[in-house]
Amino acid sequence: MKASDLKKKYLDFFVKKGHQILSNVSLIPENDPSALFINSGMHPLIPYLLGETHPLGKRLVSKQRCLRTQDIEKIGNSSHLTFFEMLGNWSLGGYWKKEAIEWSWEFLTKELNLDHKRISVSCFAGDKDSPKDEESAKIWKSLGIPSERIYFLGKEENWWSVGETGPCGPDTEMFYDTGQKACGPDCRPGDNCGKYFEIWNDVFMEFNRLPNGKLEKLKQKNIDTGMGVERTAAMLQGKDDIYQTELFSGLINQIEEISKKKYEDNNQKAMRIIADHLRAATFAIADGVIPSNTETGYVVRRLIRRTIRYGRQLDINQLFTFKIAEKVILSYQKEYSHLKENQDLVLDQLQFEEEKFQKALQKGLKEFEKIINSDLIDKTKKIPGKSVFFLYETYGFPWELTAELAKEKGLLVAREEFFKFQKEHQEKSRVSSNKKFAGGLADHSQEVTKLHTATHLLHQALRQILGEQVRQVGSNITPERLRFDFTYSEKLTPGQIKEVEDLINEQITQDLVVKMEMMSLEKAKKQGALAFFTDKYGEKVKVYSIGDPSTGSGQVFSQEVCGGPHVNSLGEIGRVKIMKEEAVGAGRRRIYARIK
């Protein structure tokens, strides 16, 4: 079964069960400073898991593009990815364990025709926070799963949370026996030895973890499920390598053609990394991420540079990243039209980054010469691990490249010492990354709520002062400030900034009411509501109006399609101060503002 067939079957199945299809949103979270990228299908739904009403109702299903880099060092094996598509279905205070498990079983055995005798499951074993999940086990037994194929595992395996705080709960996972030999007498699902393939995960999200670590019951019980498209497609096609599916075959063939090498043992790791990283970078750039040295831009730059390093291992001595990206766009443009629309941007950025990094490689070679000519090297005939790591971290030199260069000079490298430094660095990076990628719990504090409403005021003020060609292209909000990106070709003058600021604060002074209505997207547009991110909306949307004629104010100042959260009236905000205005690309400007 092709991946496209899997995705269609999944969506169709849950639509028949009364679910509404969610739009596939950008990789960049909207108004969520706690995560750099959308890293799961449920990420955009966190406010609704906490109890906010979703415009489409309580039953939802989606196919969502995701990006994770926590396990970047594992990329190169047969199953790990940074960019992937996630299938998921949700119940927001509706159905519970019985329906979720029974529908999972029905989809796996009836729609995908998997052999029910090869399916095993795991359930939560229980601890001081939550009891053993006997309820799920009982449901599985009623469906025909015998006790010997039901495993009770601890929190590490069978508990899921969005981060250190927020919605969480026990889960039940489904595994398929691949037929491979058991890794030992205690071989079981979750061993990652290759015998049991994880198919699906049903999370029973009924708790909210507080900052003090304690659990409290959520206002509603939620179902949150996740099925990875690439891994499941590989399993359905009888392949133990996701890079051998149709999702990657075109990319691998292109890499073979460019490198003049075959996808064989010695080349597989490099080819997998190139295919994965450039697929991820292509999607990220198309979603508006420009490679840089900070946050999302740094992640994309790192992906591109790792790609170039591994291209060198394949003896690729030409600009090649944009050629692979062209294949990615060609493969996905029917599903993701924005890839084709932003093709020039993607290819230009990749070529620019590749040319730039080639210069870094040249500088690294000069640094290598300095290292090997030092007195320390003369005495030991070995390049210290610290120096090897310096070349790796600063100039992107794989230790294998340094070792090859050293061999030509009759030298060795302190390989084990290098790995020690690398491991220490990875651990520091992983701790930092996990804090940032912990799960994307959107901050709905009072400060963020005020600033979110202020972005609507800023948007409308810019359109009134600069013209209606201004449109929002991105935003990011923390409790301390708002960041707002918009289309405009010229630097704002001090006078224009003051006009915008004064217009915003004039509305706040009037204490205009903020009103929310639920309606169709078509109706929202007809009545003048701004809705620029149309690819992320469903049939029903929330429209927030600032200034309600029924209150006697006479007119609506701002009206936008938005998911919230917002203040009830502008007087709650306080005075808005614009701190900075700058360019962030051709035809794009950025404003930073805070509340005084």
Image: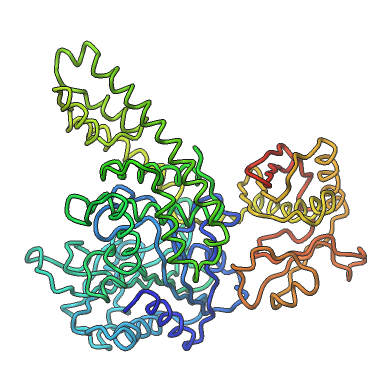
Number of numbered discs overlaid on the protein picture: 0
Rendered location of residue 529, percent (x, y): 76, 67
Q: Residue at x 53, y 49 (%)?
A: 289
Q: Which quadrant of the view contains residue 155?
A: bottom left
Q: Residue at x 35, y 59 (%)?
A: 251
In this rendering, the answer to whether 432 lies above or below 80 is above
Residue closer to the observer: 168 or 283: 283
Question: Coloring scheme of the render?
Answer: rainbow
Rendered location of residue 478, percent (x, y): 61, 47
Rendered location of residue 537, percent (x, y): 62, 70
In this rendering, the answer to whether 364 lies above or below 103 is above
Q: Residue at x 81, y 37 (%)?
A: 493
**Going by the image, does 108 lie left or right of 418?**
right
Q: Residue furthest left?
A: 185
Rendered location of residue 352, percent (x, y): 49, 41
**Going by the image, does 478 lie left or right of 200?**
right
The quarter of the picture where the N terminus appears is bottom left
In this rendering, the answer to whether 557 lies above or below 508 is below
Residue closer to the observer: 411 or 457: 411
Q: Residue at x 27, y 24 (%)?
A: 387
Q: Which quadrant of the view contains residue 491?
A: top right
In this rendering, the answer to whether 107 lies above or below 194 is below
Q: Residue furthest top?
A: 375
The quarter of the picture where the C terminus appears is top right
Residue closer to the observer: 446 or 184: 184
Q: Which quadrant of the view contains residue 119?
A: bottom left
